[in-house]
Amino acid sequence: MKKQLAFMVNSKKCIGCYSCALACKNQYHQEPGVVWRDLTPLSEEHYPHRERAFYSLACNHCAKPVCVEVCPVQAHEKRAKDGIVVHSAEKCVYCHACIDECPYGAAKDNVVLERAEKCSMCVERVDAGLKPACVLGCPTKALTIVDLATLKDSKAEQYPPGFDKHEKLNPSTRFIRPTAPQLALAKKDS
């Protein structure tokens, strides 16, 4: 397998603080209403401890990204060297094709600037040897970057409960499922 950088979302560690989303917003100063990374709470159907487990979601940098396929002006590009799907806003003609076709909702509609936008995994930071802003902003290290070509974590899942399955796109994001909280009991002195 070729190098494919991916977000790893460890829901065991995520505390739902939104630091990842705020770090992204601070890095790129998106217009009000435009959010490239967001926190999705897991429903009780998928995790019975309400408001306790979250998925931090942005672009999945899919192996076969629909945004690249449908863009008439090649404003989206999947980089061969690391698999990051980069969006060039200056090329965008605001046709809405990527917005309409991405089943994960990664492409966002910036009505103020009249263009589509999406997470490009802070490609300029990655190219400089730095972590993406969302990863750097996570206080619990619940969000990291991994290379799928070398990932050996047997607990990492591609389609955990609560994350839509679109096999044709082959999203790169991986998840560690949350577990039920454990009650810590104090030991009695003998």
Image (tube, rainbow, N blue to C red):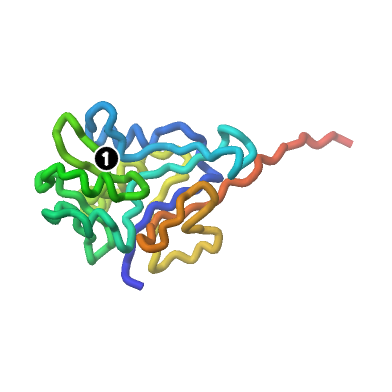
> In front here: 25 or 67?
67
Could you tell me which residue is drawn at 35 percent across and 41 percent down?
Answer: 134
Q: Position of residue 182 (x, y in %)?
A: 69, 41
Residue 72, quarter of the rendered image? bottom left
Residue 21, quarter of the rendered image? top left
Could you tell me which residue is drawn at 15 percent across and 52 percent down?
Answer: 75
Could you tell me which residue is drawn at 14 percent across and 33 percent down?
Answer: 113
The residue most toward the top is 32
- Report which residue position mark 1 lands on: 108
Could you tell me which residue is drawn at 34 percent across and 44 percent down?
Answer: 105
- Badge 1 marks a residue whose secondary structure is strand
Q: From this viewpoint, is residue 150 visible?
A: yes
Q: Position of residue 51 (x, y in %)?
A: 56, 32
> In front here: 99 or 40?
99
State left or right for residue 75 relative to residue 37.
left
Q: Position of residue 27 (x, y in %)?
A: 25, 36
State left or right for residue 137 relative to residue 165.
left
Determine whether 145 is above or below 95 in the image: below
Q: Quadrant of the N terminus?
A: bottom left
The residue most toward the bottom is 1
Task: Classify mark 1: residues with Cα within 10 Å, few (<14), some (14-19) or many (20+).
Answer: many
Q: From this viewpoint, is residue 147 visible?
A: no
Determine whether 71 is above or below 152 in the image: above
Q: Quadrant of the C terminus?
A: top right
> In front here: 24 or 138?
24
Residue type marked 1: Lys
Q: Position of residue 108 (x, y in %)?
A: 26, 40
Residue 26, quarter of the rendered image? top left
